[in-house]
Image (tube, helix red, strand yellow):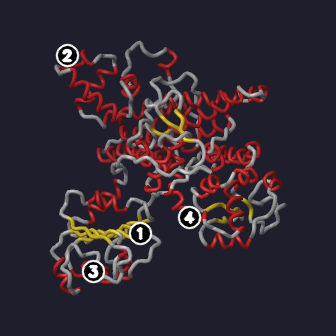
Amino acid sequence: MRDVVAPEPLPLWPFTGREDELRLVRRSSAGARRGLVVTGPPGRGKTRLVTEAVRGTDCARVAGIPQAHRMPFAAFAPLLPESVTLHRAVRLLSGVRTLLVDDAHLLDDSSAALVHQLAVRSDTRLLIVVTDGAPVPAAVSRLWTGELLPRLPLGPLPREETAQLVAVGADRTPEPLTANRLHRLAGGDLRLLRELLGALRGHEDLTRVPGTDEWAWRGPVPLTPAVREHTAHLLTRTDPGERETLDRLAFAEPLPVDLDDPTDPEHPMDPARRAACPAPLDLAALERLEGDGLVHVDGRGAVRLAHPLHGPVLRAAAGRLRARRLARAPEEYGPALDAETAALTALIGQADVRTVPAPVGDWLVAEGVPVPAGYAALRARYARLRGEVREAAAWAREGLRTTASARSGPAEAEAEAGVGAAAEARAELALVKAQSPALASVRHSAHAPHDPYDAVRLGAPERAAGRLTGVFAAHADALTHADGPALDRAAGELERRGFLLFSAEAYAQAAAAHRDPGAARTARTRAVALARRCQGARTPALAALALGELTARQRQIVTLAATGLSNRQIAERLTLSIRTVGNHLYSAYTRLGASDRTALPRLTDSRPADSRPAELREAQPA
């Protein structure tokens, strides 16, 4: 068990993401609108959102006070005199243009009634923040149940934006599998995310990813005070049956309820795992844990812990002997990984990559347990198809790391058997690098497989004629006929199926094909939004989009730099200072997602005439 008492402080995070929610909150406090109620679990970022929305405006602010229910108008003490009636309080505050009420679930009855009356009788715009799961005064809940104000339930910060926050103030950015793990463990609680990051700074389980400026975290969760606080309801369970059930799930979830016949072929656990299960779970303990929201039982009778943080915390808190009794040997996870491999392969075959049904593989990598190279290569391919190019590279590196570890061990024969899987991992890594200037400055790799769909992505659909089916064939046909609306439909279907990078490329092609300027702008906007979710991917189809994000001067300088001209030569040609050219290039690198000028030729598709091998001038699989 590892305790971390004093995590290092982190720099203040900038406001990141939530553009749509921010726009909605700002609109709600402007014009004829009356305001908005923002709700969400603790740590979701509700207060930060509304504070950002009213920044620079004339906004009064009050907050609910814990344990102040018997003090009339306690929350409004800064704005009201000591002795005041409800009627007079409404008149005194009716001149306030915008009022932000934070932690409104903590308001005393008088303050809650005042807020309700302001919503009914005054022209004051109200921004109300309420925490889910807490008792709320009836006068406050009536604001949205009575349709006086609209309600905005705040969801968790998306994974991509969480990764941006994690990188703030760090010497190196976290590699994607680490960022995904932190996102899962935090469960949308940004305060917990900060605590985890603070505990990890300088931690012995952090390693540098070779050949990159990224860091990886493998190993147990640090038991910081905040982590213990968030899981106190879990760690303080004293009933022996409940604690044994929780610990068994932590080391081997999912486990069967065994309400049905465990020999049934439709049982939620595979036969190998059922045979290894020493005893059925305590049903009475399970019922109590389910009632308290600590475990979840699905329709097939499989039991899992209710929160992603619970398993790692229970494993970290277990003593050495208890962990030794409950933990499994790495080879015992083989059947589960085989099942995930089959599920992922089937989804690829069905051209549907929206979901990633692979919790066991994620858990093993997070704990530092090597996964088979073939499994890692498949995860890399799956992530690449979803447009998650940095995550695909991370999985490919995991496969190569496993192969290297096996080669250094005594089982040389078994290691040699994984050579084919390692080759698949290397091929996936080459493919990803070819699509992401942030990962490498290489151009399209000769190791890439010649998929006929690549020809469509490269703008040569005639080369794939008769070789594609389904949505990919529809994309090829629409591009062949330069049919903008059909390209929009194909892009929408690709997005629905989870192929975000392919969808972005199709929308980019639609933007060029549309004759209607409005439709072209819509397609371009959609393409840019999807491309930004693809972890810095840059392909020929997206080159025009990348350039479109630059100013006219930046495009001019980037185009010249892509042909190989130095800053001095560009400055002389455009009659600018060298420093000005450098500043423009630096800004362009940020917008294009490039680290330096070596990536510019592929982004702008303006290579020197003799820079490409002859075999790559025909077609370059993306």
Q: Earlier in the sequence, mark 3 or mark 4?
A: 3
x, y percent for residue 24: 31, 61
Which residue, given by chain and number where applicable, does mark 2 sit on?
572
At mark 4, the secondary structure is: helix
Q: Amino acid at mark 4?
A: Ala
Which residue occupies 63% across, 41% down? Answer: 368
From the viewer's perspective, is 545 left or right of 334? left
Task: Quote the CA–CA distance across marks 3 and 4.
Answer: 34 Å
Q: Amino acid at mark 2?
A: Glu
At mark 1, the secondary structure is: strand
Q: Amino acid at mark 1?
A: Thr
Which residue, given by chain and number where applicable, does mark 4 sit on?
232
Task: Quote the CA–CA distance across marks 2 and 1.
Answer: 60 Å
Task: State whether residue 41 appears in this view.
Answer: yes
Observer-side mark, 2 or 3, equals 3
Observer-side mark, 2 or 4, equals 4
x, y percent for residue 336: 72, 48
Q: Earlier in the sequence, mark 1 or mark 4?
A: 1
Front residue (pair 457, 244): 244
Which residue, given by chain and number where applicable, does mark 1 sit on?
131
Task: Quote the CA–CA distance across marks 2 and 3.
Answer: 69 Å
Observer-side mark, 3 or 4, equals 4
Q: Earlier in the sequence, mark 1 or mark 3?
A: 3
x, y percent for residue 205: 56, 40
x, y percent for residue 209: 53, 32
Front residue (pair 6, 260): 6
From the viewer's perspective, is 408 left or right of 169? right
Neighbour tally class for label 2: few under 14, some 14-19, many 20 plus, Cα within 10 Å: few
Which residue, given by chain and number where applicable, does mark 3 sit on?
73
Task: Quote the CA–CA distance across marks 1 and 4.
Answer: 20 Å
